[in-house]
Amino acid sequence: MAAEYDLPFKARLALAVQATVGRVLSIVWIPGAAFAMRVVMRYRIKDASNLRKRFRQLARETDTPILICANHLTMVDSAVVAWALGGSWWYLFNYRWLPWNMPEYTNFGFNWYNRVGVWLLKCIAIRRGGRREDVSGTLKRIQYLLSRGQTALVFAEGGRSRTGRIDLDSIAHGMGRIVNSVRKCSALCVYLRGDRQLTFSSLPARGDSFYVEFELFRPVSEHSGMRRSRDFSQQIAERLVAMEERYFDRRE
Amino acid sequence: MDTSEIQAKVVEIIGRYAKNKEAAATATETTNILEDLKVNSARLVDVILDFEDEFDIEVEDDDADAVNTVGDAVALIQSKVA
Protein backbone atom coordinates (compact mmCIF):
# COMPACT_ATOMS: atom_id res chain seq x y z
CA MET A 1 0.00 0.00 0.00
CA ALA A 2 1.46 3.34 -1.00
CA ALA A 3 1.86 5.83 1.81
CA GLU A 4 2.45 9.57 1.77
CA TYR A 5 5.67 10.30 3.55
CA ASP A 6 6.26 13.30 5.69
CA LEU A 7 9.22 14.17 7.82
CA PRO A 8 9.76 16.15 10.99
CA PHE A 9 10.32 19.87 10.38
CA LYS A 10 14.02 19.62 11.26
CA ALA A 11 14.61 16.88 8.68
CA ARG A 12 12.67 18.77 6.00
CA LEU A 13 14.62 21.93 6.73
CA ALA A 14 17.93 20.05 6.54
CA LEU A 15 17.01 18.63 3.12
CA ALA A 16 15.83 22.03 1.88
CA VAL A 17 19.11 23.65 2.95
CA GLN A 18 21.13 20.84 1.37
CA ALA A 19 19.19 21.08 -1.90
CA THR A 20 19.40 24.87 -2.04
CA VAL A 21 23.13 25.11 -1.29
CA GLY A 22 23.83 22.26 -3.72
CA ARG A 23 21.77 23.96 -6.41
CA VAL A 24 23.45 27.35 -5.96
CA LEU A 25 26.88 25.77 -6.16
CA SER A 26 25.86 23.38 -8.95
CA ILE A 27 27.08 25.89 -11.49
CA VAL A 28 30.55 24.98 -10.25
CA TRP A 29 30.32 21.38 -9.18
CA ILE A 30 28.25 19.91 -12.02
CA PRO A 31 30.58 21.14 -14.79
CA GLY A 32 33.50 20.26 -12.51
CA ALA A 33 32.32 16.69 -12.13
CA ALA A 34 31.66 16.41 -15.87
CA PHE A 35 35.16 17.82 -16.57
CA ALA A 36 36.70 15.23 -14.26
CA MET A 37 34.88 12.40 -16.03
CA ARG A 38 35.22 13.63 -19.61
CA VAL A 39 38.65 15.29 -19.62
CA VAL A 40 40.63 13.96 -16.67
CA MET A 41 39.40 10.36 -16.81
CA ARG A 42 38.56 10.48 -20.55
CA TYR A 43 35.35 8.52 -20.06
CA ARG A 44 32.97 8.26 -23.00
CA ILE A 45 29.29 7.36 -23.15
CA LYS A 46 28.31 5.34 -26.18
CA ASP A 47 25.51 6.88 -28.24
CA ALA A 48 25.28 9.68 -25.66
CA SER A 49 23.21 12.08 -27.76
CA ASN A 50 20.47 9.54 -28.43
CA LEU A 51 20.50 8.37 -24.81
CA ARG A 52 20.14 11.93 -23.49
CA LYS A 53 17.46 12.76 -26.03
CA ARG A 54 15.42 9.78 -24.83
CA PHE A 55 15.98 10.62 -21.16
CA ARG A 56 15.07 14.29 -21.57
CA GLN A 57 11.93 13.30 -23.44
CA LEU A 58 11.05 10.95 -20.58
CA ALA A 59 11.62 13.79 -18.13
CA ARG A 60 9.32 16.09 -20.10
CA GLU A 61 6.55 13.50 -20.36
CA THR A 62 6.68 12.14 -16.81
CA ASP A 63 4.82 13.69 -13.93
CA THR A 64 5.06 10.78 -11.50
CA PRO A 65 7.96 9.86 -9.20
CA ILE A 66 10.87 7.92 -10.63
CA LEU A 67 13.43 5.90 -8.74
CA ILE A 68 16.51 5.13 -10.82
CA CYS A 69 17.57 1.53 -10.12
CA ALA A 70 21.00 0.64 -11.47
CA ASN A 71 23.57 -2.11 -11.40
CA HIS A 72 26.73 -1.24 -9.48
CA LEU A 73 30.35 -1.99 -10.35
CA THR A 74 32.43 1.04 -9.34
CA MET A 75 32.32 3.77 -6.71
CA VAL A 76 31.55 6.49 -9.27
CA ASP A 77 28.62 4.74 -10.96
CA SER A 78 26.07 7.21 -9.64
CA ALA A 79 27.98 10.12 -11.19
CA VAL A 80 28.47 8.28 -14.49
CA VAL A 81 24.78 7.30 -14.65
CA ALA A 82 23.68 10.89 -14.03
CA TRP A 83 26.14 12.28 -16.57
CA ALA A 84 25.17 9.65 -19.13
CA LEU A 85 21.44 10.32 -18.83
CA GLY A 86 21.28 14.09 -18.59
CA GLY A 87 24.66 15.46 -19.62
CA SER A 88 25.91 18.30 -17.44
CA TRP A 89 24.41 21.64 -18.51
CA TRP A 90 20.90 20.22 -18.70
CA TYR A 91 20.94 19.55 -14.96
CA LEU A 92 21.66 23.20 -14.19
CA PHE A 93 18.17 23.97 -15.49
CA ASN A 94 16.54 20.69 -14.44
CA TYR A 95 18.14 20.21 -11.04
CA ARG A 96 15.36 18.01 -9.68
CA TRP A 97 16.29 15.36 -12.24
CA LEU A 98 19.80 15.10 -10.85
CA PRO A 99 19.29 12.08 -8.62
CA TRP A 100 19.80 11.95 -4.88
CA ASN A 101 22.10 9.15 -3.81
CA MET A 102 22.61 7.02 -0.72
CA PRO A 103 26.35 6.34 -0.44
CA GLU A 104 27.69 4.06 2.26
CA TYR A 105 28.99 6.32 5.05
CA THR A 106 32.15 4.31 5.68
CA ASN A 107 33.24 4.90 2.06
CA PHE A 108 33.53 8.68 2.50
CA GLY A 109 32.88 9.69 6.10
CA PHE A 110 36.48 9.49 7.31
CA ASN A 111 37.27 13.19 6.74
CA TRP A 112 35.30 16.42 6.82
CA TYR A 113 35.91 17.54 3.22
CA ASN A 114 34.58 14.26 1.86
CA ARG A 115 31.50 14.68 4.02
CA VAL A 116 30.96 18.26 2.82
CA GLY A 117 31.53 17.27 -0.80
CA VAL A 118 29.12 14.38 -0.64
CA TRP A 119 26.55 16.58 1.10
CA LEU A 120 26.73 19.07 -1.79
CA LEU A 121 26.29 16.29 -4.35
CA LYS A 122 22.73 15.44 -3.28
CA CYS A 123 23.75 12.51 -1.10
CA ILE A 124 22.17 11.12 2.05
CA ALA A 125 24.53 8.78 3.86
CA ILE A 126 23.45 5.28 4.76
CA ARG A 127 25.13 2.65 6.90
CA ARG A 128 24.25 -0.66 5.33
CA GLY A 129 23.57 -3.24 7.97
CA GLY A 130 23.41 -0.45 10.55
CA ARG A 131 20.69 0.22 13.11
CA ARG A 132 17.26 -0.39 11.62
CA GLU A 133 16.04 3.05 12.70
CA ASP A 134 18.94 4.78 10.93
CA VAL A 135 18.48 2.85 7.68
CA SER A 136 14.75 3.49 7.85
CA GLY A 137 15.36 7.21 8.45
CA THR A 138 17.46 7.45 5.28
CA LEU A 139 14.86 5.58 3.21
CA LYS A 140 12.12 7.88 4.52
CA ARG A 141 14.09 10.91 3.39
CA ILE A 142 14.31 9.42 -0.10
CA GLN A 143 10.59 8.56 -0.05
CA TYR A 144 9.83 12.11 0.98
CA LEU A 145 11.98 13.59 -1.78
CA LEU A 146 10.46 11.36 -4.46
CA SER A 147 6.95 12.17 -3.38
CA ARG A 148 7.84 15.83 -3.90
CA GLY A 149 9.10 15.57 -7.45
CA GLN A 150 12.77 14.84 -6.87
CA THR A 151 14.63 11.87 -8.37
CA ALA A 152 16.83 9.36 -6.56
CA LEU A 153 19.18 6.58 -7.54
CA VAL A 154 19.64 3.26 -5.75
CA PHE A 155 21.73 0.27 -6.63
CA ALA A 156 19.96 -3.04 -7.03
CA GLU A 157 22.36 -4.89 -4.77
CA GLY A 158 23.07 -2.01 -2.41
CA GLY A 159 26.80 -2.54 -2.81
CA ARG A 160 28.94 -3.32 -5.84
CA SER A 161 28.41 -6.65 -7.64
CA ARG A 162 31.12 -8.83 -6.21
CA THR A 163 31.03 -11.27 -9.11
CA GLY A 164 30.85 -8.57 -11.75
CA ARG A 165 27.31 -9.69 -12.60
CA ILE A 166 24.03 -8.88 -10.84
CA ASP A 167 23.39 -11.43 -8.11
CA LEU A 168 19.67 -12.06 -7.59
CA ASP A 169 20.43 -13.46 -4.14
CA SER A 170 21.82 -10.11 -2.97
CA ILE A 171 19.04 -7.75 -3.92
CA ALA A 172 18.44 -4.72 -1.71
CA HIS A 173 14.99 -4.74 -0.14
CA GLY A 174 15.01 -0.94 0.19
CA MET A 175 14.67 -0.54 -3.58
CA GLY A 176 11.28 -2.27 -3.70
CA ARG A 177 10.28 -0.66 -0.42
CA ILE A 178 10.72 2.82 -1.87
CA VAL A 179 8.82 2.03 -5.09
CA ASN A 180 6.06 0.38 -3.06
CA SER A 181 5.68 3.23 -0.62
CA VAL A 182 5.71 6.23 -2.95
CA ARG A 183 2.47 6.68 -4.80
CA LYS A 184 2.65 6.04 -8.57
CA CYS A 185 6.39 5.54 -8.35
CA SER A 186 8.10 3.81 -11.28
CA ALA A 187 11.54 2.30 -11.53
CA LEU A 188 13.90 3.54 -14.20
CA CYS A 189 16.14 0.49 -14.64
CA VAL A 190 19.60 1.57 -15.81
CA TYR A 191 22.31 -0.83 -16.91
CA LEU A 192 25.79 0.69 -17.06
CA ARG A 193 29.05 -1.01 -17.92
CA GLY A 194 32.45 0.11 -19.14
CA ASP A 195 33.99 -1.96 -21.94
CA ARG A 196 37.00 -2.68 -19.74
CA GLN A 197 35.01 -3.40 -16.59
CA LEU A 198 35.46 -7.11 -15.94
CA THR A 199 34.39 -7.14 -12.30
CA PHE A 200 33.86 -4.60 -9.50
CA SER A 201 36.50 -1.94 -8.78
CA SER A 202 36.96 1.47 -7.14
CA LEU A 203 37.09 3.41 -10.42
CA PRO A 204 36.48 2.53 -14.06
CA ALA A 205 39.64 2.34 -16.16
CA ARG A 206 40.83 5.68 -17.54
CA GLY A 207 39.59 6.15 -21.08
CA ASP A 208 36.82 3.57 -20.73
CA SER A 209 33.67 3.73 -22.89
CA PHE A 210 30.35 3.05 -21.22
CA TYR A 211 27.37 1.19 -22.55
CA VAL A 212 24.25 2.64 -20.92
CA GLU A 213 20.67 1.51 -21.42
CA PHE A 214 17.50 2.35 -19.55
CA GLU A 215 13.88 1.16 -19.34
CA LEU A 216 11.00 2.61 -17.41
CA PHE A 217 9.21 -0.08 -15.44
CA ARG A 218 6.24 -0.13 -13.09
CA PRO A 219 6.21 -3.35 -11.04
CA VAL A 220 2.91 -4.89 -10.02
CA SER A 221 2.23 -7.44 -7.32
CA GLU A 222 -0.72 -9.31 -5.89
CA HIS A 223 0.91 -9.21 -2.47
CA SER A 224 0.78 -6.54 0.20
CA GLY A 225 2.99 -5.35 3.05
CA MET A 226 6.63 -6.32 3.13
CA ARG A 227 6.10 -9.16 0.67
CA ARG A 228 4.97 -6.65 -1.93
CA SER A 229 8.15 -4.60 -1.44
CA ARG A 230 10.16 -7.80 -1.77
CA ASP A 231 8.29 -8.71 -4.95
CA PHE A 232 9.00 -5.25 -6.40
CA SER A 233 12.73 -5.52 -5.63
CA GLN A 234 12.84 -8.91 -7.28
CA GLN A 235 11.02 -7.75 -10.41
CA ILE A 236 13.27 -4.71 -10.82
CA ALA A 237 16.38 -6.83 -10.33
CA GLU A 238 15.15 -9.39 -12.87
CA ARG A 239 14.62 -6.58 -15.36
CA LEU A 240 18.21 -5.45 -14.79
CA VAL A 241 19.48 -9.00 -15.20
CA ALA A 242 17.67 -9.21 -18.56
CA MET A 243 19.35 -5.94 -19.59
CA GLU A 244 22.70 -7.35 -18.50
CA GLU A 245 22.13 -10.49 -20.57
CA ARG A 246 21.31 -8.37 -23.61
CA TYR A 247 24.54 -6.44 -23.06
CA PHE A 248 26.65 -9.61 -23.02
CA ASP A 249 24.74 -11.08 -25.98
CA ARG A 250 25.63 -8.01 -28.03
CA ARG A 251 29.29 -8.23 -27.06
CA GLU A 252 29.63 -11.82 -28.21
CA MET B 1 -0.11 -19.19 21.65
CA ASP B 2 1.76 -17.82 24.68
CA THR B 3 4.88 -15.69 24.76
CA SER B 4 7.29 -18.56 25.39
CA GLU B 5 5.89 -20.55 22.46
CA ILE B 6 6.19 -17.53 20.17
CA GLN B 7 9.74 -16.89 21.36
CA ALA B 8 10.73 -20.51 20.74
CA LYS B 9 9.38 -20.33 17.18
CA VAL B 10 11.05 -16.95 16.62
CA VAL B 11 14.43 -18.27 17.78
CA GLU B 12 14.03 -21.35 15.59
CA ILE B 13 13.28 -19.22 12.51
CA ILE B 14 16.09 -16.74 13.16
CA GLY B 15 18.45 -19.65 13.80
CA ARG B 16 18.10 -20.73 10.16
CA TYR B 17 19.69 -17.45 9.06
CA ALA B 18 22.11 -16.88 11.96
CA LYS B 19 25.81 -17.17 11.24
CA ASN B 20 26.49 -17.43 14.97
CA LYS B 21 24.76 -20.74 15.64
CA GLU B 22 26.03 -20.91 19.24
CA ALA B 23 24.47 -17.57 20.13
CA ALA B 24 21.27 -18.63 18.35
CA ALA B 25 21.04 -21.72 20.53
CA THR B 26 21.09 -19.60 23.70
CA ALA B 27 19.22 -16.54 22.43
CA THR B 28 17.09 -14.58 24.88
CA GLU B 29 14.66 -11.71 24.37
CA THR B 30 17.51 -9.17 24.60
CA THR B 31 19.63 -10.88 21.94
CA ASN B 32 20.26 -8.54 19.01
CA ILE B 33 19.43 -10.27 15.73
CA LEU B 34 21.99 -8.54 13.53
CA GLU B 35 24.83 -7.94 15.99
CA ASP B 36 24.69 -10.97 18.27
CA LEU B 37 23.35 -13.62 15.93
CA LYS B 38 25.16 -12.19 12.88
CA VAL B 39 22.14 -12.38 10.63
CA ASN B 40 22.90 -10.58 7.37
CA SER B 41 20.78 -7.41 7.20
CA ALA B 42 19.51 -8.43 3.74
CA ARG B 43 18.33 -11.74 5.25
CA LEU B 44 16.30 -9.97 7.94
CA VAL B 45 13.57 -9.57 5.32
CA ASP B 46 13.50 -13.37 4.85
CA VAL B 47 13.27 -13.80 8.62
CA ILE B 48 10.24 -11.54 8.82
CA LEU B 49 8.56 -13.14 5.81
CA ASP B 50 9.03 -16.49 7.57
CA PHE B 51 7.30 -14.97 10.62
CA GLU B 52 4.41 -14.04 8.33
CA ASP B 53 4.09 -17.61 7.10
CA GLU B 54 4.53 -19.22 10.50
CA PHE B 55 2.12 -16.98 12.41
CA ASP B 56 -0.24 -16.13 9.54
CA ILE B 57 0.28 -12.40 9.94
CA GLU B 58 1.14 -9.52 7.62
CA VAL B 59 4.00 -7.18 8.42
CA GLU B 60 4.53 -3.72 6.92
CA ASP B 61 8.01 -2.40 6.24
CA ASP B 62 7.57 0.28 8.89
CA ASP B 63 6.65 -2.37 11.49
CA ALA B 64 9.79 -4.30 10.68
CA ASP B 65 11.97 -1.25 11.40
CA ALA B 66 11.30 -1.76 15.11
CA VAL B 67 12.71 -5.29 15.11
CA ASN B 68 16.24 -5.25 16.55
CA THR B 69 16.09 -8.00 19.17
CA VAL B 70 14.36 -11.33 19.63
CA GLY B 71 12.07 -9.59 22.13
CA ASP B 72 11.14 -6.94 19.53
CA ALA B 73 10.20 -9.73 17.10
CA VAL B 74 8.07 -11.46 19.73
CA ALA B 75 6.33 -8.17 20.60
CA LEU B 76 5.62 -7.49 16.91
CA ILE B 77 4.12 -10.93 16.41
CA GLN B 78 2.04 -10.67 19.57
CA SER B 79 0.64 -7.34 18.40
CA LYS B 80 -0.33 -8.89 15.06
CA VAL B 81 -1.89 -12.11 16.32
CA ALA B 82 -3.82 -10.40 19.11
Image: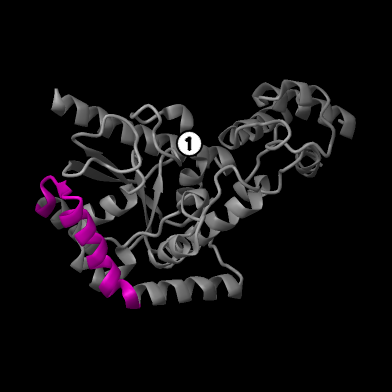
Q: Please name the residue shown 38% across and 59% down the image.
A: A65
Residue A154 at what x, y percent from top left? 41, 48
- The kind of secondary structure the magenta stretch mainly shows is helix
Mark 1 burial class by Cα count in 10 Å: few <14, some 14-19, many 20+: many
In the image, the segment drawn in magenta is A24-49
Which picture quadrant has residue B23?
A: top right
Q: Amino acid at mark 1?
A: Asp
Q: Please name the residue shown 73% across and 31% down the image.
A: B55
Residue A122 at what x, y percent from top left? 40, 64
A90 in relation to A233, above or below:
below
Q: Nearer the viewer, residue A12 or A46?
A: A46
Residue A13 at what x, y percent from top left? 53, 76
Chain of the residue on which disc 1 is drawn: A
Task: Examine the structure image and report whether residue A205 is included in the region drawn in magenta.
Answer: no
**Total count of labels:** 1
Q: Please name the residue shown 48% across and 39% down the image.
A: A172
- Horizontal side of A187 relative to A46 (left or right) equals right
Residue A3 at what x, y percent from top left? 54, 57
- Horizontal side of A203 relative to A139 (left or right) equals left
Under circle 1, the secondary element is helix
Q: Is residue B2 visible?
A: no
Location of mark 1 (residue)? A231
Q: Please name the residue shown 45% across and 52% down the image.
A: A103
